[in-house]
Amino acid sequence: MSELILHHYEASPFAEKARRIMGLKGLSWRSVEVPMVMPKPDLMPLTGGYRKIPVLQIGADIYCDTHLIARELEQRFPDQTLFPMGDRGIAYGIGAWSDHAFFDDILTIVMSSAENWEARMREDRKQLFSEADWAGAKAKLAHARTQVRAHGALIEAQLSDGRRFLYGDAPGFVDLQASHMFWFCWRNFPDADEMFAGFERVRAWEERIAALGHGNVSPIESGAAVEAARLAESTTQPWVDPDDPQALPLGAIVDVAPDDYGKEPAQGELLVYGPDRIAIRVEGERTGNIVIHFPRLGFRVDLSESQRS
């Protein structure tokens, strides 16, 4: 099997979730440090224009979003499971809370200080989070802080019986789905201890998750990763869910984009679509033929304009 190559940057909570998946599974992987702001000249050819991170590359197969990265790594490396309690459905589902409700409140706190950012970062993030209320962030700061504390209270309650992890004595994906947001808070907010005051179990739990590490990491240059994709061949086979409500035809040219933010679509030939994933085949000058995979939940797939006419 081709090497695992993770495209990410250090400060992202979503990238930290992916790194912790590697750590829980004890995997060896190559690290590509992606720029925090656009342009991202060696990432975009691999993703068809999708700009968010993390992105996992395995040969000529490219996996976008932590949920799909988790699914793929669990399938390929089942021995050290992400689901020690068999909680596959709820463990994926909890991401709708952490990556949206919890993240949105954290984002408001972050945006409230945007006037102090370097101009390039501020403009990039305003483009990325184009539908966020940048002008009203300061007015919402106190409320956002109370909400972040309320999110912490949920985890404190889950741990109140003395369990070490959210579902018992073994860590799993459900823990990783929640812990990355607390990691971000303690890393970036000087008053995080105040926001989570009295939640000693949450802090101890987050430290146990952090102690799992990130696996065995070695760097690789971004250009070498692109070349690795060009030299490889995708192992993905065409598949369609016969009960899918959209009933899109395989081989159609489609646009795939997140439905929350960073909505720039990737375009390609539809190869796989079902309840858990979408995959498109893309041919690039630098990458050759690659297949880009997205989770179905939280992503839109539509016929491209040329296919609709």
Image: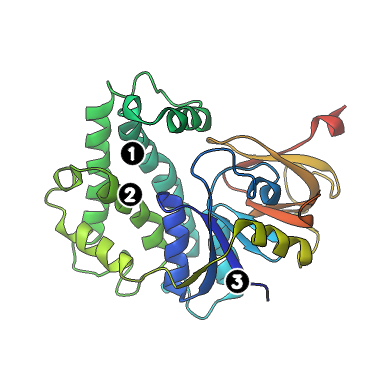
Task: Provide residue 187's location: percent of width, then percent of height.
Answer: 28, 50
- How packed mark 1 is, by other alpha carbons closer than 10 Å (few <14, some 14-19, many 20 or more), is many
Q: Amino acid at mark 2?
A: Phe
Front label number (2 vs 1): 2
Along the viewing direction, whichever of 246 and 75 lies nearer the viewer = 75
Disc 2 and disc 3: Cα gap in Å?
Answer: 28 Å
From the viewer's perspective, tell me whether residue 64 is left or right of residue 120: right
Q: How is the image coloured?
A: rainbow
Q: Is residue 46 visible?
A: yes
From the viewer's perspective, tell me whether residue 208 is left or right of residue 259: left
* Residue placed under numbered mark 1 in the picture: 106
Task: Provide residue 21's location: percent of width, then percent of height.
Answer: 46, 66
**Which residue is most to the top?**
135
Disc 2 and disc 1: Cα gap in Å?
Answer: 9 Å
User: Is disc 3 placed on a helix, strand or loop?
Assistant: helix
Front label number (2 vs 3): 2
Task: Provide residue 127's location: percent of width, then percent of height.
Answer: 52, 28
Counting residues from the start of the chain, the first of labels 1 and 3 encountered is 3
* Residue placed under numbered mark 2 in the picture: 184
Residue at horizontal 57 percent and vertical 64 percent from the top: 220
Q: Is residue 240 visible?
A: no
From the viewer's perspective, tell me whether residue 272 is left or right of residue 100: right
* Residue placed under numbered mark 3 in the picture: 75
Residue at horizontal 23 percent and vertical 35 percent from the top: 145
- How packed mark 2 is, by other alpha carbons closer than 10 Å (few <14, some 14-19, many 20 or more), is some
Counting residues from the start of the chain, the first of labels 2 and 3 encountered is 3
**Which residue is most to the left?**
198
- Position of residue 268 relative to residue 214, above or below, is above
